[in-house]
Amino acid sequence: MSGHNILVIDDEEFIRLNLQNILQEEHHRIFLCSSGKEAIATVQNSDFSLVLLDLNLPDMNGIDILRQLKQIQPNLLVIIITGFASVESAVEAIKLGAYDYIKKPFKADAIKLIVKLALETQALKERVKQLLQTHKPTGLNTILGDSAEILKVKHQILEFAKYDSETVLITGESGTGKELISQALHNLSPRHQFDFVEVNCASIPENLLESELFGYEKGAFTDAQSTKKGLLEKADNGTLFLDEIGEMSPSLQAKLLRVLEHKTFRRLGGTKDITVDLRIIAATNKDLHQAITDKEFREDLYYRLNVLRIEVPPLRNRGNDILILAHYFLAQFSKRYNKKPKQLSPAASQELLNYNWPGNIRELKNLVERICILHQSELIDSFNLSVKSNNPAEKTAEPPANQMLGKIPLDEILFNMEAELIKHALKIAEDNASQAARILKIPRETLRYKIAKYGLSGG
């Protein structure tokens, strides 16, 4: 496994050597500096993926070192090593662009975990940067992600695009990106020079949907003052995308079946057959087999639509694609609303990975947009996706705030409080991390990260 160049900056030789031994076990190449000036000179002459920086160095202020390192290498990952006494400075460092901080004394597993998460996050950001540079509304680059589940879908798109006379049925939960997939199928097909026409069958009343699809002749009904072409004619030589096909009425299903079988139709009020050459792509989030059983969907139409089929996976099954999409949306909305780019903390990233996403990509996109508009800080520490407990027995007594205000920095109070709450939960759960996570109402992986960060026992 190929490692990374990592620089350790600490004036204590024992800590430098300890970190070197820990990180070399992960196959990284470790470089050591004992002062701020030496570190700055080293970074000026070499490229590093990550720096571990002790804030308390004898020759320079750690915050000043961070600023200079970021000037030399703006995308450099910096993890702050701190004691309880300098938590406030560590939080300030994060605001200046440090990835995260970890307190002394630290455990080997904590260092390995925070470095692993930092490097993985950086890799995701680079991937998103590439996507933003190449992102155009054509082809497969609209389908973001590298998971096995979405790669299968991309392969199907490439294969099915060739067979541009065959119908395609796209199935999947609401918000999974079925419309993007239909657009990609069209853009990669021989029909890409002609129109891609879409209609949502659930959003238009039955009588209006029929006239929208088939058009009408002048005088076909009271308000038909002139002849109007329908979407079938507009999509001639191109692609017609029927979203939410499962909501189409049985009578309209019969007329659509005739179009699929004969490639002809008549406008409302018309007597002349009109021939069309088009591809029909249909999508649904309904169980069409059940709809057939319930006499809500025609079985013969189902088989005509289901010549080629793409099943779109729910977002919760796509692993790190969730973070790729989140970083992409963060960059997109930060630019749209003229905000400074926001960063995800490791805990926030883990929160996204552990959430169930019932609304899929649409829910994630809306969440990130809301965060970009309302969240003032550049660091997103939590999305508050976990369900909060209303059980009084699970609530922890409030600290004597009046005794702390003005005496202890807020960041240090929060640091200590979170560590104490986790200790208390682990004690109740007898060091069972899964049970403690349930008590705290946070994902187990988030708790695992915090246990490592605070150097606690349990897991």
Image (cartoon, rainbow, N blue to C red):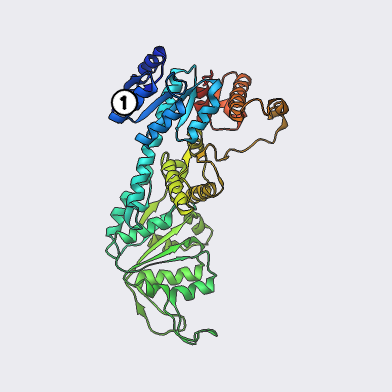
- Find disc 1 in the rendering and name its residue: 42
Asked whether the viewer can see residue 46, the reply is no
Q: Position of residue 355 (x, y in %)?
A: 52, 39
Front-most of residues 210 and 422: 422
Q: How many marks?
A: 1
| 388 displayed left or right of 144 | right
Residue type (three-letter) at the residue carrying disc 1: Thr
Q: Secondary structure at mark 1?
A: helix
Q: Position of residue 331 (x, y in %)?
A: 43, 47
Q: Position of residue 8 (x, y in %)?
A: 37, 22
Few, some or many residues within 10 Å of mark 1 (<14, 14–19, 20+)? some
Q: Is residue 261 above or below residue 102?
A: below
Q: Position of residue 300 (x, y in %)?
A: 42, 63
Looking at the image, which residue is at 48% across and 33% down? 94
Res 261 → quadrant: bottom left
Residue found at the far top of this picture: 14
Q: Is residue 279 above or below residue 413?
A: below
Quarter of the figure with the N terminus: top left
| 220 displayed left or right of 257 | right
Asked whether the viewer can see residue 349, the reply is yes
Res 412 → quadrant: top right
